Image: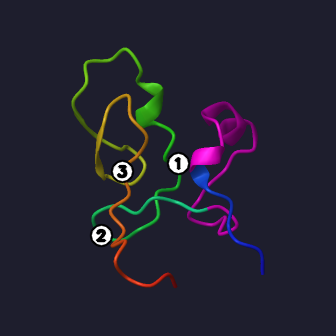
Amino acid sequence: MPEPRPWTDITPEEAAAQKLNLVVDLTITAPLNEEGERCPWPWEPQQLVGAPLGQYHCPYCGAMVMAGMPHLDYADDTAPAA
């Protein structure tokens, strides 16, 4: 099975055009929220370029992220990949 495509390699425009939902599309990686759930559409926060930089709740998964920055991933990067 091929490695999943990194979600960060996909532009928000491409994601919207393909109507991606990363909860169901496991061929693409997804950042996890604080509860360990995959964010269905992590491109929202990075589109807020020009907004005051600050904390922002992702409306898709509820994770606390930074406006204008790529979605944070709360995955434990010390654990082996599943």
Amino acid type of the residue that numbered disc 3 sits on in the rendered structure: Leu
Report how many numbered discs are placed on residues in the image: 3
Q: Are marks 3 and 1 in contact (CB under 8 Å)?
A: no
> In the rendering, at what x and y percent does residue 33 appear?
34, 61
Amino acid type of the residue that numbered disc 2 sits on in the rendered structure: Glu
Mark 3: which secondary structure? Answer: loop
> In the rendering, at what x and y percent does residue 60 appear?
43, 49
Mark 2: which secondary structure? Answer: loop
Kindly report the distance in space between the C-alpha atoms of the residues bearing marks 2 and 1. Answer: 16 Å
Which class describes the residues within 10 Å of circle 1: few (<14), some (14-19), or many (20+)? many
Q: Which residues are magenta?
A: 8-28
> In the rendering, at what x and y percent does residue 10 appear?
66, 43
Kindly report the distance in space between the C-alpha atoms of the residues bearing marks 3 and 2. Answer: 13 Å
Sequence-first disc among 3 and 1: 1
Q: Residue at x 32, y 31 (%)?
A: 67
In the displayed structure, 27 sits above or below 78; it is above
User: Mark 3 or mark 1, which is nearer to you?
Assistant: 3
Sequence-first disc among 2 and 1: 2
Q: Residue at x 41, y 20 (%)?
A: 49
Q: Which residue is mark 2?
A: 35
Q: Which residue is mark 3?
A: 72
Towards the viewer: 42 or 1 = 1
Q: Residue at x 61, y 35 (%)?
A: 12
Q: Which residue is mark 1?
A: 41
| Quadrant hosting residue 66 | top left
11 inside magenta stretch: yes
In the displayed structure, 68 sits above or below 29; it is above
Sequence-first disc among 3 and 2: 2
Amino acid type of the residue that numbered disc 1 sits on in the rendered structure: Trp
Judge from the rendering whether residue 12 lies leftward or rightward of residue 39; answer left or right.
Answer: right
